[in-house]
Amino acid sequence: MHTAANSAAPPAGPGQASPGQVWAHVGQAFTPQDYDVVILGAGRMGSVLAFYLRQLAPRLRLLLLEEGGLPNEDGATLLAPGVWTTWGVPQDRRAQATWTREQLHTAFGDISFQTRPLIELFAAGGPDRSPTADALAPFPDALALVDVAALPFARVDSGAATYRPGALALAAAQMAVKAGADLMLNARAHAALTPQASGGLVTIERLSVTNTHQIVVHETHRLRAATLVLALGADGPHAAEHDLGLHTTHARAYRQTPRLNAPSSDDTPVLRAAGLTLRPQNGGFTLIPAVHHRDPHGYTPTGGHLTGVPTGLRRETLEDLVALMEALPPLGTGALGLGRSISDVPGAWLALPGGRADGLPLHQRLADGVHLLLGGPHADTLGLAVAHDLAAAVAGREHRPWQDEDEPAR
Amino acid sequence: MHTAANSAAPPAGPGQASPGQVWAHVGQAFTPQDYDVVILGAGRMGSVLAFYLRQLAPRLRLLLLEEGGLPNEDGATLLAPGVWTTWGVPQDRRAQATWTREQLHTAFGDISFQTRPLIELFAAGGPDRSPTADALAPFPDALALVDVAALPFARVDSGAATYRPGALALAAAQMAVKAGADLMLNARAHAALTPQASGGLVTIERLSVTNTHQIVVHETHRLRAATLVLALGADGPHAAEHDLGLHTTHARAYRQTPRLNAPSSDDTPVLRAAGLTLRPQNGGFTLIPAVHHRDPHGYTPTGGHLTGVPTGLRRETLEDLVALMEALPPLGTGALGLGRSISDVPGAWLALPGGRADGLPLHQRLADGVHLLLGGPHADTLGLAVAHDLAAAVAGREHRPWQDEDEPAR
């Protein structure tokens, strides 16, 4: 199933491939053909999977499908914090995290990768904690945000790093295309299991936009994928159940990332307190609230009221920020972009692998030749390794690059 | 503030009081007067508070207000499991739990109180666990529900008990009225803080039902309460914020209690597995699913689909039951009352004190002379003690009956 039997193109090794085709809009004619691998979703996980598949299995004909543009403005990738840290990563996944960091640094060109300390602040002391005043002394921008008396203790991850997940997804997709992957944008896809065979049948609806800004289906195609991967983020588990009839235990949560207009620079560390991450970005801060648990099915995000005042932040996030206003005084000022309705605040559905708020990225076999690929809350730190792991499995490789170097390579 | 200064009635001790007035419908004329204590909500917590207040402070003029009937069919009291157990109760609250059990047994007449073992089943062994086959051997009704191979280990709380929380609320309210409390049903109340004074102002909307089953406001009254208690269950925190402008951190979750039509008797123990409680009731079982976390603000409960089939159970509950179907095979049969829409399955909003799924009952001072009283998930075991504690505080008593008996009594 992973051979290039269906491929009309001549076999090509890495570096020798001719670029794949790109269909960006319905004006470009598309003649359906069967593929060895079809990936639904060109967010970070799907794009990176396509990139690694071109490296590990260049003979496989590969199609990457994306409902929106590159990157999709409704997806979680664009709003992901882009903070690499080993905090929260179990010991047995540390090698994957370290490998992911190296890849982020070197493999995708300029994705604004930089080493940048992550400093977590606490009300109480503990192991590995030092005085906040000392930890923040070199960083006046950060110090200005904090009431040191309320959060007098700090721990530092000096090996942390930041990057732009949207830039990563774009670079990975472009490099995959350059290495021979086909890519279709503005294409909504539905999958079905292939009767009595592995892989899946894919129905592609090519979308266009009318003069009145309605999204309509321009044309529909069907093709067969020997291997099918759902890389649809928080929509993946729904697609698995709705399209394929395969129930999973994954869930999702709606995470908003409001803006805090307090000055930051490239030298400002990432701050964290009570689960809230303050990520320096574009001269200010993006706030990434803690995800405490999944949202129930049927929940529609709505702006919350606090003692009568409407805001664009959902109530749960608002409560978390209110609880931190004394410790981080700028949260109580007009610097915080509260908005007045839900559409005023950037937000996206985040996949929660295993239904857990601390779920780690994973891939999961749903049926023979059908896989689910999920990023979730730790995709910044482990996503590349998990995508690579699936690519290697599809390619039939035994070795993983983060494994002991004493082991025989590939 | 707790004196009977406003009272026109002569002081009366316990046992000597003349009964209070009851306004059940708008045909009974009501002339507003000020009260020493007004309790909003005649569910379990409010009714029991009224009962203890008549015992501890019989001179205080007391009004109990309830939006529905006795008990309110939309409230959490009627659907509460009515399972007393010390499991999950911290050591420092055990004396309150024991006192609550004694009160349930003796103080409220026939509320179907009976000692009944609670048996929790596990896939793995551990301290205090014995073979399930042994633990369930005396109980063939219970044994018939369980795949013993899937849940081979059990622990037993032989001191557990069951009762009917709805019967408790009704009895407590009736006894409070008999001891002199006034009670108004079908009365929606809104509270406001009293400017420059303690207590609150209460606006009462007396409700009636039209020929077309619309609920309308028949008349509106205003009165003053020197002490005001919000005992509105899951609606209490909302009322505190909306009516009084006082933000709290409490939350709520929508809990459904589907029926399992498998035979049970008065001798059948309560079963528990993976957080699901199976409560023998009316010849079958009421299922009480685990509450994992609060529901977000703005969530509207909806029936879930499982691989396309619509049910009346919300999706999260459905997933928990599906995960248990192998261990408890009747869950996978028509014996489970799944329903086809949310209105088919009994359910109610449950208060989560402190926003926590394991929050303990509490009372909280919101303002001078204004209190919030919350039951929540552990109201069955600790609710009476917490209501008594608030009654004693309002009455100015130092002693609590569950305190060491060596201490001076009252």
Image: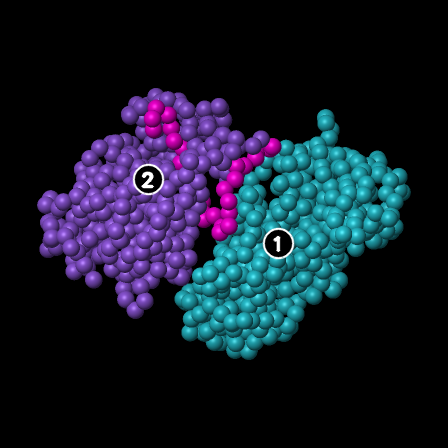
Chain colours: A purple, B cyan
Q: Dot 1: few (<14), some (14–19), or many (≥20) neighbours within 10 Å?
A: many
Residue at image coords 41%, 24%:
A261
Answer whether residue A282 is magenta in the image.
yes
- Residue positioned 75% across, 62% down in the render: B109
| Residue type beneath disc 2 | Gly
Query: Visible in this render: residue B249?
Result: yes
Looking at the rendered structure, whether the residues under marks 2 and 1 are on a common chain is answered as no
Near mark 2 (Cα within 10 A), the count class, few <14, some 14-19 or many ≥20, is: some
Measured as percent of width and height from the top left, residue A255 is found at: 43, 40
CB atoms of marks 2 and 1 within 8 Å:
no
Q: Nearer the viewer, residue B186 or A224?
A: A224
Occupied quadrant, residue B9: top right
Can residue A97 be found in the magenta stretch?
no
- Residue at 71% across, 34% down: B192
Q: Which residues are magenta?
A: A281-308
The answer to whether any part of residue A227 appears in the image is no
Identify the chain of the residue marked 2, using the numbered disc in the image. Answer: A
Q: Which mark is residue B348?
A: 1
Q: Is residue A235 left or right of residue A397?
A: right
Q: Secondary structure at mark 2?
A: loop
Q: Which residue is mark 2?
A: A69
**Secondary element at tag 1:** strand
